[in-house]
């Protein structure tokens, strides 16, 4: 259960409309509906019920709303106090610039050299790095409304429209990365030249504990039902934990020595993009340009032509 799921739930609980809440949260109604459905699966009970007027909170949903409200209030106070603590202990006159990066880029092992490059280009500028997925970055961008906001996101092809819902944001796409299937060399999949979506739907899947990746898996097999996710984990050595399973991975993520990569027919493309405000400061523009150059240099095979939202 993730804190942004609770924020999504509370917004829907207040509006009682997926369409209104999706607009408030700058995500698509489909994405919001999937998030609520995932939360209900995790809770083990329905949060909403159908009514003539639309949707209403279930009896358990009402109690869950009280608990979620209390938790989010505590979380916001925690964030505020941590921010104050950080500002009170920094020796720099310059406030840190917060940079948001997706798990996909972190797992590719390219975040440390990227930060080395930024520190070389901006030696007097302190950076604060936060791991965040697409929905978190879009929510933070809408909340901060800062001219210095910079975030890197991984955007599945079927969610590109979500990045256009907030007209104040500029989204510059840098890379186009295909999703592939990873398996152990000693598994029964070793001789496979390609897998179809239908075949993927029948296989046990080990999933990195990241909501965007799970949404990609569900999108790929939705025609055939629920995916057979046997394990959710936060370790990159996923296949060592479940020998006969497969992993869905972006092709830029390094393989382990005992793994193979299998192309997926009719795959999903994931776009790596840099998000900033259209009213960005010159500093933000310079940082965005430096990140874009680094990504193009490191992943030249996946470089896309200039494309902005």
Image: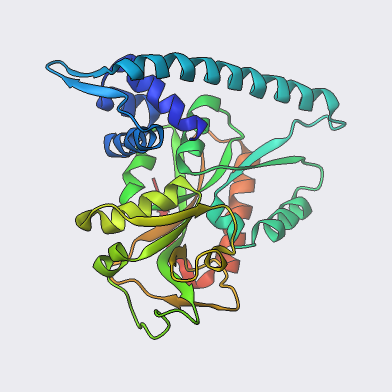
| Count of numbered tags | 0
In-front residue for pair 111/192: 192
Of the pair 148 and 69, the residue shown nearer to us:
69
The answer to whether residue 20 is left or right of residue 67 is: left
Q: Quadrant of residue 120?
A: bottom right
Residue 129 visible within the image: yes
Judging from the image, the colouring scheme is rainbow
The percent position of residue 11, horizontal first and vertical second, equals 38, 21
| The furthest residue to the left | 52
Q: Is residue 162 left or right of residue 247?
A: left
Q: Residue at x 29, y 35 (%)?
A: 33
At x 75%, y 30%, the residue is: 95
Taking the image as drawn, is residue 304 in sight? no
45 relative position to 256: left or right: left
224 to 279, vertically: above or below = below
Percent across and percent down for residue 97 are 69, 37
Quadrant housing residue 151? top right
Quarter of the image for the C terminus: give it.
top left
């Amino acid at each position: 259960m993730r804190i942004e799921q609770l924020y999504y739930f509370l917004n829907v609980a207040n509006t009682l409309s997926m369409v209104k809440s999706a607009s408030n949260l700058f995500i698509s109604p489909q994405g919001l509906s999937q998030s609520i459905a995932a939360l209900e699966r995790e809770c083990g009970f329905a949060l909403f019920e159908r009514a003539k007027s639309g949707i209403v909170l279930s009896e358990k949903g009402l109690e869950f709303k009280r608990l979620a409200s209390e938790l989010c209030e505590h979380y916001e106070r925690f964030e505020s106090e941590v921010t104050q603590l950080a500002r009170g202990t920094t020796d720099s006159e310059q406030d840190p610039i917060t940079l948001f990066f997706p798990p996909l880029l972190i797992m590719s092992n390219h975040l440390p050299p990227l930060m080395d490059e930024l520190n070389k280009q901006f030696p007097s500028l302190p950076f604060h790095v936060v791991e965040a997925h697409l929905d978190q970055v879009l929510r933070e961008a809408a909340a901060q409304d800062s001219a210095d906001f910079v975030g890197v996101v991984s955007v599945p092809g079927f969610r590109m429209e979500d990045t256009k819902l907030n007209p104040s944001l500029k989204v510059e796409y840098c890379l186009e990365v295909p999703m592939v299937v990873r398996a152990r060399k000693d598994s029964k999949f070793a001789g496979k030249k390609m897998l179809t979506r239908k075949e993927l739907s029948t296989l046990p899947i080990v999933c990195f504990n990241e909501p965007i990746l799970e949404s990609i898996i569900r999108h790929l097999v939705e025609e055939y039902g629920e995916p057979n996710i046997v394990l959710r984990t936060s370790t990159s050595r996923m296949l060592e934990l479940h020998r006969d399973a497969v992993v869905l991975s972006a092709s830029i993520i390094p393989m382990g020595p005992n793994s193979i990569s299998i192309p997926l027919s009719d795959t999903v493309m994931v776009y790596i993009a840099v998000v900033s405000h259209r009213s960005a400061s010159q500093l933000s523009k310079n940082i965005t340009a430096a990140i874009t150059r680094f990504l193009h240099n490191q992943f030249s095979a996946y470089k896309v032509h200039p494309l902005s939202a």
